[in-house]
Image (cartoon, rainbow, N blue to C red):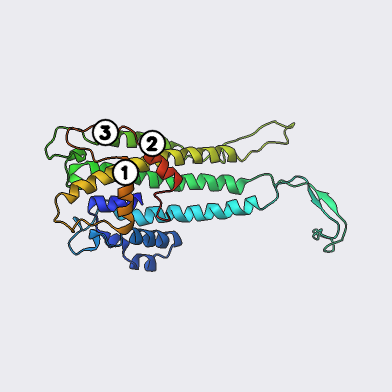
Amino acid sequence: MAGALDLEAFGANVACLHPVIEQIRPFPGLAATLHQLRLLLAGSYLWQPGAARFLQDPLTFRCLPQIHGAARDALGYVMNILQIELNSSQSNPVVVPAGNLPGEPGSEPGNGQGRIVSVGNFDIGHLAAALDFLRIALAPVVTSANERAVKLLQAPYSGLPAGLAAAVGSPDDALAELAVAGQAITVEARTLAHPVSYELASSVKGEGIEDRATMAPLSARRLADMIALSARVAAIEFVVAAQAIDLRALSVPDGQGQLGLGTGRAYRMIRELVPFTQADGTLPADLEPLVELVTMGTLTPAA
């Protein structure tokens, strides 16, 4: 949703959403992302001939479907791993009832006698590595989200006043300081992407028997922290995009700045919480209500 609103705000070239893309590069996540973006932008002025400002937009706009598509496929992989893990046994030992014992190497299959089997199924390496993978996949998403917001705040890229000031040539910083905040939060989020599932070298715990750990709890905690930080970057992204949309609408005839069905809904929800920053105005006092909307999923395409 934030990415689609960025496309509206930038006056982007929607050729990057052409249906041929998913035909010649058939990744499921890419196809799903393209479909969502086209739905959100249905009815937008961006589809009108001549609406695009550039033939090729900066990569964080032009590659939006590829960036989000890769993350979507990574999430699908991780969800499959999680489903298997949550529906499996991590017990040690495993009690095998009589009559249910599989055959062992060198023996007749199913000897019918129960036994206790010592196992290491408590090692959840699959899940630990998958959580690492998901954070790595999320890093480009949050990085590109912040970069799009920064581009919208810069006049040479947006074609709008610097900092998205309400008046051309204004000395006001307007929303420029949001770029600094977004960059700082993004850097913090990116540091959490470092894998941890291989970090424990050795241990003498349990008299040297327990000499391995997957670090899955740390991996999960870092993922939760990274998502919380990413929600704040998305909130900044929404505010910046809404300001750019308002300024761009001032320069086009009535009816030619129409937003898409999904992006228009998101824009209205944002404006209920964060008003347009007027000339001589200050930064929005509080973005936490918008962060909450992001966290609750109210602004997702599915909603």
Total marks shown come to 3
Marks 1 and 3, how far apart in space?
A: 16 Å
Q: Image check: 13 left or right of 300?
A: left
Q: Residue 278: x and y, percent?
A: 19, 37
Marks 1 and 2, how far apart in space?
A: 13 Å
Q: Amino acid at mark 2?
A: Glu
* Residue highlighted by disc 2: 288
* Residue highlighted by disc 3: 283
- Pick the residue in front: 296 or 164: 296
- Pick the residue in front: 189 or 281: 281
* Residue highlighted by disc 1: 272
Q: Residue 149: x and y, percent?
A: 29, 43
Of labels 1 and 2, earlier in sequence is: 1
Q: Amino acid at mark 3?
A: Leu
Tell me the mark number nearer the camera, choosing from 1 and 3: 1
Mark 1 burial class by Cα count in 10 Å: few <14, some 14-19, many 20+: few
Q: Give above or below for 218 relative to 45.
A: above
Q: Amino acid at mark 1?
A: Glu
**Are the two marked residues, 1 and 3, in contact with CB atoms closer than 8 angstroms?**
no
Of labels 1 and 3, earlier in sequence is: 1
Q: Residue 86: x and y, percent?
A: 64, 50
Q: Quadrant of the C terminus?
A: bottom left
Residue drawn at (73%, 32%) of the image: 206
Q: Residue 91: x and y, percent?
A: 73, 46
Q: Give above or below for 120 relative to 200.
A: below
Judged from the image, the secondary structure of the residue bearing numbered disc 1 is helix
